[in-house]
Amino acid sequence: MEWYKKYDKIYGLIVSDLELIKQILVKDFNAFRNRQPRARSKKQIMKSMFRARDDDWKRVRAIASPTFSSGKMRKMYALINRCCEDFIDSFDKDVSNGMNEVELTRLMGAYTMDVIASCAFATKTNTYADPNNPFIASAFNIRNIAVWKGMLDTFIPRFLINNYIYRRVVDVGASGMDFFNDVTRSLIKKRKENHEKHNDFLQLLLDAERPEGDIREASDANEAHHVNEGKDEMKANAEAFTGVSEKKLTEDEILAQCLTFFTAGYGMTALTLSHCTYELALNPGLQDRLYEETKEAFNEKGEMDYEVLSRLPFLDALISETLRNSPQILHLQREAMEDVMLGNTGVKIEKGVSVEIPVYAIHHDPNHYPDPFTFNPDRFMPQNRDHIQPYTYLPFGSGPRNCIGMRFALLEAKLALAKISHSFRFSRVTDTDVPVVYTTVLFGSLKPKRLVVGVHKR
């Protein structure tokens, strides 16, 4: 934020000018199609959409994109809903047994763990009753990388990193990756042998084929992440995936996507839900608005239809403001694949240079969002959404390389918030940190030390 305020719209290799951001992410996408590589990334990780490069990324993304369409999310809705019901039932028992305070990151982490395990690996973790479940332990082995391990793996010279003894001692997340690979291979083998079909992420990847045309649906327009979309964005998406002839993913590529989906979806969605619930605890009026909106949306059986959930404006505004105020990705990074002139600035980005877009700083620029450090969901209500400038809201990135899992993340978060607000109230207590205290920021993520709030049943 200090650099963002002190310097102009281009400083160092960080770009915050909105037209130039559009150039990098959309108009000149092919010139900035890759993220900067990590020389020591594991071979499997390089097959994931997050790390894959050039034609490898293009092919995997093109084939996998239909997996995350609104239509496919609708098919997975029942599975997510069952996980959410288990979550609410478990939380209700805890509150009924006298729990009146809760640490939100643990609470929401248990929910997102169960959702991801069920939707990606057809595995019920029973995370609320069995926190030592091998599935959960393996997830923490990957996600909770100790700071010293991460720093060593990033900065130690390559000749030492590649040393077998070093890798055995400090091989970040290896056992966890092996566990998930074994689980996924076993599931694939079983489904092929028994001709089984499931409505989950793994099945969608097994069945995925390169689509023709646009996969968006009309219901997508109800969500704020579409503020950046226009003719240029649609053109860039069409051009980015031309020439892909392969129709299916290999088994290794499916393994890589499952692992990435798990590690990215578990932690980030949990933190978004945690921050949102924290803000509700500090703002009782917002809780009342959410309750009034959602109580009308539940049917007589206490259920909410997928289409109804996607059309709740305040719920969407609440999550959108959470993602603006507490984005899980602090900056976006792209590598120049050729020499590129940035607009009419006279600045040339040379091939191989990495450019960063400061998402957190842009989200907190008072020129874009008045009183930016105040939590105000009304910014994203339908009547105000047109005032949001394109490329000032980037929680999922933008352009052909945006977050492919954003629909899933939003669905998972919206359903949990709707149900939890229907049954519980949250409040500020003595142990509630105001403002939030953050721990060490590692590799572009922001992690709160704790998010403690009070809770009681409605």
Image (spheres, rainbow, N blue to C red):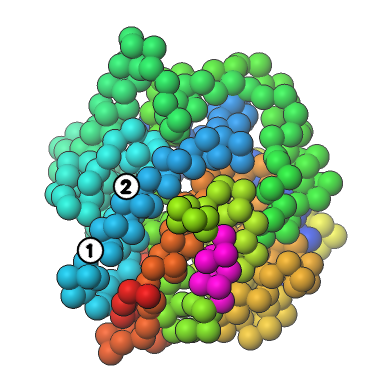
Q: Hey, which quadrant is residue 161 in on the image?
A: top left
- x 49%, y 56%: residue: 300
SS category of the residue bearing label 2: helix
**Closer to the camera, 338 or 109?**
109
Which residues are the magenta region?
289-297
Magenta includes 82?
A: no
Q: Earlier in the sequence, mark 1 or mark 2?
A: 1
Residue at image point 77% right, 71% down: 383
Q: Position of residue 130 (x, y in %)?
A: 16, 50
The vertical placement of 202 against 314, above or below, is: above
Q: Position of residue 432 (x, y in %)?
A: 32, 84
Please tell me the numbered disc located at residue 316: none
Q: Going by the picture, which residue comes out furthest to the top?
A: 193
Where is mark 1, residue-wise?
93
Q: Which residue is mark 2?
A: 114
208 over 49 or under it: above or below: above
Report the magenta stretch's main SS: helix
Tell which of 408 and 21 is nearer to you: 408
Describe residue 362's horizontal placement relative to residue 39 as left or right.
Answer: right
Residue for point 33% across, 9% down: 193
Residue 380 lies, in percent from the top left, at 67, 69
Q: Position of residue 286 (x, y in %)?
A: 53, 79
Quick check: can you spot residue 349? no
